[in-house]
């Protein structure tokens, strides 16, 4: 019966309007073409679907039965097209994003706010997780895109765009005031009580690798799940915290914490937007990414766009 789908479409309009002429108008085809389609359908299924009188045409009992099913299906098609149009116009839809506390708070949140102002009907679901889990969510198709921090190991199908530079620092409170304005060697961290993120985060992995490259092996006093808690522990003088600088910006500005200085710079890292090349993005997700990229385009000295990609 799949070959007769066009006949069923014509049948739906004839039955709906009770007129061959009106069906032809609605379908933008000739009345003879409508009549021929109905004859072909009746021949195909082996029964009369319409009876004709001086008052027009009417469905037979068999036609009534068939129409009860065809109308439901055709109206579902129409509704599907309508919903699809709404989705393409961003009147409905859903975006699934993976982000850590750090990337959400210090990069993504302003873009989500702006996007929601323009498209309040789009549902946004944020899966809050560290970088390794966000990468896994992306590869499993559970999110449309993620915002992660370097370093990370991306699969062959993952594309990443640098969107923000970040800086890692060590911060301390008054208990460690003797280290303020003093230039330290990273080796001295081995003798100090340290507060770091848990080992399943890209931030912790980065710091461990950097220190190991400097010949420093650390054993943190505290390992915490969030950078906010590291700042709170440092404020209570429980140790020296390793955080992204923006997490402690308010406390550093007020003097409640100070930043330790070293004889070697900690290389800066990046926030990156990651997408999976195998999975096409929805119109809503593409629109949000356009908003993000247009808001943070980096240009070189000649004014050319200078975005870097990892693959």
Image: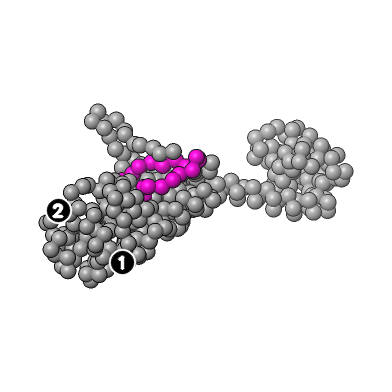
Picture disc at residue 296: none
- Mark nearer the N terminus (2 vs 1): 2
Which of the pair 151/107 is nearer the observer?
151
Up/down of 231 relative to 268, above or below: below
Residue range in magenta is: 149-164
Distance between mark 2 and mark 1 Cα atoms? 23 Å
Which of the pair 2/45 is nearer the observer?
2
Image quarter hosting the C terminus: top left
Which of the pair 68/224 is nearer the observer?
224
Q: Quadrant of residue 242?
A: bottom left
| Residue neighbourhood size for the residue with mark 1, other residues' Cα within 10 Å, grouped as few (<14), some (14–19), many (≥20) | few
Residue placed under numbered mark 1 in the picture: 221
Q: What's the residue at 70%, 32% (across, down)?
A: 30
Q: Position of residue 268 (x, y in %)?
A: 27, 46
Does residue 167 appear left or right of residue 153 in this picture?
A: left
| Residue neighbourhood size for the residue with mark 2, other residues' Cα within 10 Å, grouped as few (<14), some (14–19), many (≥20) | few
Q: Position of residue 234 (x, y in %)?
A: 24, 66
Q: Quadrant of residue 41?
A: top right
Picture disc at residue 183: 2
């Amino acid at each position: 019966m799949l070959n007769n789908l066009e006949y069923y479409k014509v049948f739906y309009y004839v039955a709906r309007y009770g007129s061959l002429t009106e069906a032809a108008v609605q379908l933008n085809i000739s009345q003879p073409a409508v009549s021929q389609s109905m004859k072909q359908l009746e021949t195909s299924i082996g029964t009369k679907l319409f009876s004709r009188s001086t008052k027009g045409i009417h469905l037979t009992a068999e036609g009534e039965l068939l129409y009860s099913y065809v109308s439901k299906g055709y109206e579902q098609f129409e509704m599907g097209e309508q919903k699809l149009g709404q989705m393409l116009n961003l009147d409905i839809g859903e975006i699934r994003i993976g982000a850590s506390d750090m990337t959400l708070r210090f990069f993504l949140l302003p873009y989500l706010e702006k996007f929601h102002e323009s498209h309040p009907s789009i549902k946004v679901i944020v899966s809050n997780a560290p970088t390794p889990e966000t990468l896994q969510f992306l590869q499993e198709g559970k999110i449309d895109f993620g915002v992660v921090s370097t370093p990370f190991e991306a699969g062959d199908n993952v594309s990443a765009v640098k969107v923000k530079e970040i800086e890692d620092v060590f911060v301390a409170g008054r208990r460690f005031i003797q280290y303020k304005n003093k230039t330290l060697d990273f080796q001295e961290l081995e003798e100090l009580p340290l507060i770091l993120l848990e080992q399943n985060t890209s931030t912790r992995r980065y710091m461990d690798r950097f220190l190991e490259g400097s010949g420093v092996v650390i054993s943190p006093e505290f390992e915490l799940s969030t950078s906010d808690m590291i700042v709170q522990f440092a404020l209570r003088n429980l140790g020296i915290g390793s955080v992204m600088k923006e997490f402690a910006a308010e406390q550093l500005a007020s003097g409640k914490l100070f930043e330790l200085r070293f004889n070697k710079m900690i290389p800066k890292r990046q926030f990156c937007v990651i997408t999976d090349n195998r999975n096409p993005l929805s119109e809503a997700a593409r629109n949000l990414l356009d908003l993000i990229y247009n808001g943070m385009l980096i240009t070189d000295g000649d004014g050319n766009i200078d975005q870097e990609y990892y693959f």
